[in-house]
Image (spheres, rainbow, N blue to C red):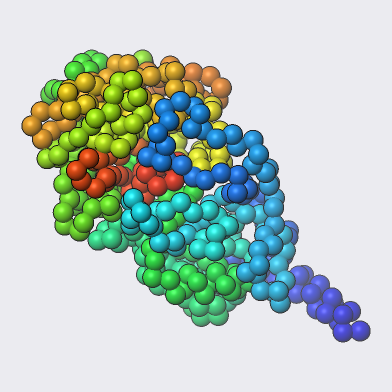
Amino acid sequence: MKKIIAILLVCFFAVSCVACGGGGDESSSAFSNADASSKAESSAATSDDSSSEAVSSEDSSETSSDVVSDDSSAEDSSDVSDESSDVDGDVEIGEINWTTRYVSWKVATGNGARTPDVVKADDATSLKISKFNDELVAGDVGVFTYDKSGKTLDTEGMEDFAIVVAKYDHETFSYVRDEFVAVGEADGNVSIPKDGFVVVIHKAYTDKINAISTTTNPLFPHGFYSNSGLDADIDAAKTAPTIDGEVKSGEYGKAVWDINPDNQLVSYAQFEKGNYTATAQVYITYDADNLYLAVVVDTPTHDNTATAADPGQMWKYTCIQVNLSSYSRDTDYLAENWDWGINQTSTKDNAMRQYGFGVTNDGETLTCVWQGDTTKLCENCKVVREGQTTTYEAAIAWSDLNKDGEVFAPKKGAKIGLSVSLNLGSLTSEFKNVTLRDGGGIIGINDWSKIPTITLD
């Protein structure tokens, strides 16, 4: 009899509940009390993280495609509902469709401390995300960002959710927990940081709520970005730059990125606080044949003993790493293939390529391809070291890049992904990187969602 009454009550509430509306640029109303099983999206599903470890080029000495592990064993887990042990058994939730995105709070160790360590979505220190800037239902874990949801999050109807506000701290070059709202305490609007994100967690995940509410570790977003300030438009070249290791007036125009410790969108996380020993300017232009890139680095130290016979070893020393993608960050393609550690589709398609450029202590230019078709080298490049300035210059052929199964065709309005990191290795000093925000999609776990979007103007 009790069971029958319970079923009748459930039916009554299912009929009488009304979803909360609202939204707009200034405020996001993101909760629905409809049944989770009927409202959950068919969004990008979680891959089986156990198939491989995340690998960035500094973790490998290989220069051939052998460094790319076969991801064919990864389970196609579309529409997989979460059955993790941290769900409170007394809370009934419907099927939840998890995206591949997640937030972690693991302490980084070893080389690259204070930058994201290799973590997986199912780790104890990770929280999988089911919704991104979208309506929530019972059982969801959602993320909201300023650029998509506006200044504030309307918490009406979120009594069954905990809320975590993460804000970027330029002093530590990481996201820190700025505010925590416990389950049942949501009242009114919560501010969404312009430089950060908000995580909303259903009460079913009590273990995760307890862990994230008390951790003092930085929070790190995986598979999504929180600041688009590095996105840029670039002009076509009136005359193709001369690739000679010198940036001449008028060749590129104004620098697209100024890499220095005061730039809020650049990370010096691997450096001792206040002792930042490198700055750089990044120039980009293009024509019908090539993307032209120049990176002018000012640093007092330089050491590169790699050789032309094995240029892939240069990651250990002073060089730069460059990622180029024919797909921009917001495309479905990269949303599905952002985590190179478990999914190498993008590099197998040659839609994502990672280059290395350097100059030996004897003045010889080195180039390699760490990810993508390694037979397609960028041969038109030159790196020159004079005083404490190193100029990296390259013409990267569009014909080396694919999109939708065909050679990429540059045109006005096309959007690509491009990122740069500075490697400052030395035999006599600790290895360090200067990166764009969140590793720039290079350093850390090769998270393609962190690659800035460049629009061809």
Whole-percent x, y for residue 291 in the image: 33, 23
Relative to 380, is 26 above or below?
below
Residue drawn at (29%, 16%), measured in percent from left and top? 380
Q: Position of residue 164 (x, y in %)?
A: 46, 69
Q: Residue at x 54, y 63 (%)?
A: 124
Q: Answer with the quarter of the image where residue 427 lies.
A: top left
Residue 72: percent from the left, percent from the top?
Answer: 64, 35
Kindly indicate the quadrant of the structure image that contains residue 404: top right
Give the tally of numbered discs: 0
Q: Is residue 167 visible?
A: yes
Judge by depth and name the residue closer to the eye, 311 or 154. Answer: 311
Instruction: Say above or below: 79 vs 235.
Output: below
Quarter of the view holding residue 25: bottom left
The front one of 255 and 89 is 89
Specify the farthest residue to the front.
Answer: 428
Q: Residue at x 56, y 44 (%)?
A: 52
Q: Quadrant of the N terminus?
A: bottom right
Q: Is residue 148 left or right of residue 274?
A: right
Please report the residue visible at 57 percent of the width from the left and 72 percent of the height from the top: 207
Image quarter where the C terminus lies is: top left
Q: Return the residue nearer the eye: 48 or 195.
A: 48
Whether residue 16 is visible to the viewer of this picture, yes or no, is no
Q: Measured from the top left, where is residue 414 in percent x and y?
A: 42, 28
Residue 351 to residue 107: above or below: above
